[in-house]
Image: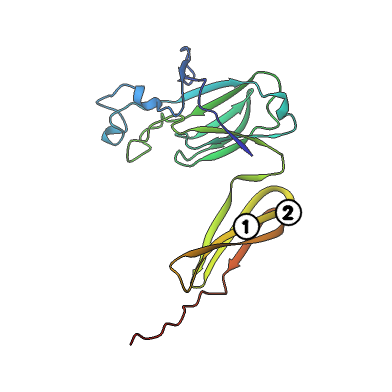
Amino acid sequence: MQATPFNDSWAYRHLNSEEAFTPVTLPHDAMLYEPRLENAPGGSNTGWFDGCDYEYIRRFRPDEDLRGEAIILEFEGVYRLAEVFVNGQKAGSCDYGYTGFTVDITDLVAIGEDNEIRVVAHNADQPNSRWYSGAGIYRPVTLWTGPREHIDVDGIGVRTLSTDPTGIEVSLQTTGAGKAHIEIFEKQQNADTATSTPTSKRITSKVAGQLQQSYLQTAKPTKKATQPSR
């Protein structure tokens, strides 16, 4: 998958208003531009800023070479109760404001034509945080493109199983069936020197949506015997 920053050419305004859109570059904290009120529902927890709802829009024209490819938007953070629309159709949502999420817009965009991405963020239902949260699309956005069958965004995980002997578990989440090639590198401590030698192990496994592959090192380096000094 190819990652492309998707942070410029956005504009925002208050939701359900007749205001003109204001151009912004992400990440953008809309709450910072609200007035501070003595009776703000969030009080000192939100710095006395007023809470409001917002909408962001961005237009883009996918190139012809993306026809037949997967097109995915990754949002690292939208506060909060985010809704994502593509050309007027709802494509995804995420309630929690501190969680990153992805939205597959492959079947909603028109290749070679202008498309509108619209993101709605709700923050008027104050108080909703014990600290200053900000509001809007406050983290970067990335456009992912590539084959329709691919490893998911953030679809690779590594978990420690054991430290003695060394053991890890590698997990993959994919959008289709196929073969996964996993190469694991480790350093073997040389017994007679202070250096280490990198080695690798290549594993080929069939995968159909989800794969978990464990690797346990069974051979451990041995120390070279030394003669006592005389």
Residue 211 versus residue 15 in the image, above or below = below
Judge left or right: residue 226 versus residue 183. left
- Identify the residue position indicated by label 1 in the image: 183
Hey, what amino acid is under mark 1?
Glu
Nearest the viewer among 23 and 165 is: 165
Hey, what amino acid is under mark 2?
Lys
- Tally the numbered discs: 2
- Mark nearest the camera among 2 and 1 is 1
Judging from the image, what secondary structure is the residue with disc 2 in?
Answer: strand
Judging from the image, what secondary structure is the residue with disc 1 in?
Answer: strand
Residue 1 versus residue 51 in the image, above or below = below
- Identify the residue position indicated by label 2 in the image: 179
Judge left or right: residue 119 versus residue 45. right
The quarter of the picture where the N terminus appears is top right
Residue at horizontal 47 percent and vertical 17 percent from the top: 23
Residue 216 position, x and y percent, is 58, 69
Judge left or right: residue 17 versus residue 105. left
